Image (tube, grey):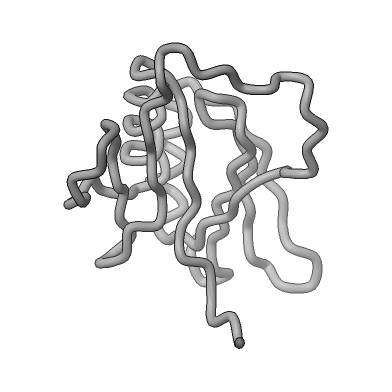
Amino acid sequence: MTTTGLNHFNLRAPRELLDELKEFYCTVVGLRDGPRPQFWNFGYWLYAGDKPIVHLYQAEPDEERDAQAVTTFDHIAFDCTNRPEVEATLVRCNLHYRATEVPGSKRVQFFLKDPAGNGVELIFPSSDA
């Protein structure tokens, strides 16, 4: 087997938080809500171009998540364009972020958190002023 890339990542949350996550990933990250198969639970598939890369699923009302679980997850990264517009959106939405430059490349990274506290990185090419 040869892995050829990342297919998607899945976030599972109660409906209210699920809707906040959808709004964040569409408004801030620039994904769009698109078609989703008729699974048994409610959710959204969020697309970058023609690929559904973020899957959001509603958690069951009695579902318990292990809040004490040790995790090594730090963040998910998205290749982005139009840095000035994205930065204006972050400011308008009053979202705290940290901007850095990838050493030796002039690529800019924005680090922030989604409404569930997951780390998100937005990476801009050096040509995107």
Q: Nearer the viewer, residue 29 or 81?
A: 29
Q: Residue 81: give x, y in percent of width and height.
A: 42, 61
Pick the front one: 114 or 106: 114
Query: Where residue 98 sits: x, y (%)?
Result: 68, 38
**Quarter of the figure that contains the N terminus:** bottom right
What residue lies at 48% left-to-right and 20% top-to-bottom? Answer: 94
Q: Is residue 53 left or right of residue 122?
A: left
Q: Identify the residue at image location x=63%, y=53%.
A: 109
Residue 33 picture location, percent across and down: 23, 45
Q: Residue at x 78, y 37 (%)?
A: 71
**Is 78 or 107 nearer to us in this picture?**
78
Q: Nearer the viewer, residue 6 or 42?
A: 42
Which residue is situated farthest in the bottom direction here?
1
Q: Quadrant of residue 112?
A: top right
Q: Viewed as shown, does residue 78 lie left or right of 119?
A: left
Residue at image x 58%, y 69%?
126
Q: Is residue 14 above or below residue 51?
A: above
- The total number of labels drawn is 0
Residue 19: percent from the left, percent from the top? 32, 24
The answer to whether residue 74 is above or below residue 4 is above
